[in-house]
Amino acid sequence: MRRCILYITFITLAGCQPAIKYPPGGYSYPEHLLDRDTNFYLYPIKDLEPRRDSFVDANGYDFYQSAHEPNLSIRPQPVPTFRLTYSVPLGTDYIISLTPEYITIKIRENYSDECANLPDTSRLTSLERMHYRILQYNFPIEPNGRRNPARQHRLDSLGSVYPALHDAKYYSYLYNKANAHKAPCLTFTQRQIKITAAEFDSLVGRINASGFWQMPYHDESGELGMDNPGYLLEANIPDRYKLVRGIPAADSVPPYRQAWQQLVKKAGMDSLVVIAFSNTPDTSIKRPIVVQETELQEVRQELPKHKRRPKH
């Protein structure tokens, strides 16, 4: 009997994996969350980033909800979850998630015809339509801002006549009214890769050792541009949440991006998702161009023959 107990104890201990120790950093989950904030997928930074960026983030929930992705920033998930979102302008979007058992890859396929016709400003009154256009290009309208003096004077005058232009909730109301849709805007394909506990520990260990948890929420080392892809890296563990967003840069490859690129490689997506350019061939190296010798033929240009003028 004692031998059986010792055997069972040995098997139990052998099957236990040591808990991963995460470095300090990140954000605590909110204690008192309002219903309207559950759609804010980057909740901890809503008051840290500029008001315009915060407004864009607040209205970006449709992307993740279309992909059936949880809001990692407001509460812990059943298991530790790491998520990489990669968006290519005029291209497509990718979501790669890591959990203890699976790597899940989601790729955006289609954009609905209904959403392609949005915003639909015909849903707004004439006054709301005017306000919506103003806020689209000038939000936030702040008194005594730093814009061109003539433009700022005009906006200050409009703000004094229509105080609602200073209220982000009013802009949100106009935005939601003009962009309301019935079905999800996006559709995604999905596949999963089964991984072992050792593989999960290895990938997370690389991320933990890379300085990811100590990074600011916005990595400013990227190269701004209309065609440059953007990435968002998130970690959800039992006691906190972490995010880092940025733009890849060929001349700046922080270790944390190299660590996340290992997840991309494990997912088999490294030909499409690149946040660490050091893992790709260096296209900046100039290689000699080999020109084969070719015998050239002499080409003579024939002079035009002069036509005789007809006799009259």
Image (cartoon, helix red, strand yellow):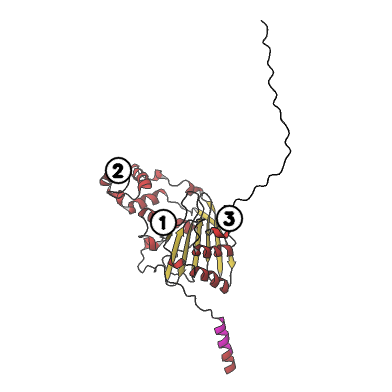
Residue 282: which disc?
A: 3
Q: In screen coordinates, is 118 left or right of 11?
A: left
Residue 254, percent across and down?
49, 62
The residue depicted at 33 percent of the width and 53 percent of the height is 168
Q: Which mark lies nearer to you, 3 or 2?
A: 3
Disc on res. 149: 2
Q: Residue at x 46, y 66 (%)?
A: 212
**Number of other residues with Cα within 10 Å of mark 2, as a class: few under 14, some 14 to 19, many 20 or more:** few
The single residue placed furthest to the top in the displayed view is 312
Pointers 1 and 2 in contact (CB under 8 A)? no
Callout 3: 10 Å neighbours few (<14), some, many (20+)?
few
Check contact, mark 1 vs mark 3: CB within 8 A. Answer: no
Q: Secondary structure at mark 2?
A: helix
**Residue 128: x %, y % from top left:** 34, 45
Q: Where does the magenta region start and end?
A: 7-18
The amino acid type found where label 1 is placed reads Asp
- Mark 1–mark 2 distance (CA, rounded to whole Å): 29 Å
Residue 49 appears in the figure:
yes
Does the magenta segment cover residue 253?
Answer: no
Query: Identity of the amino acid at label 2?
Result: Pro
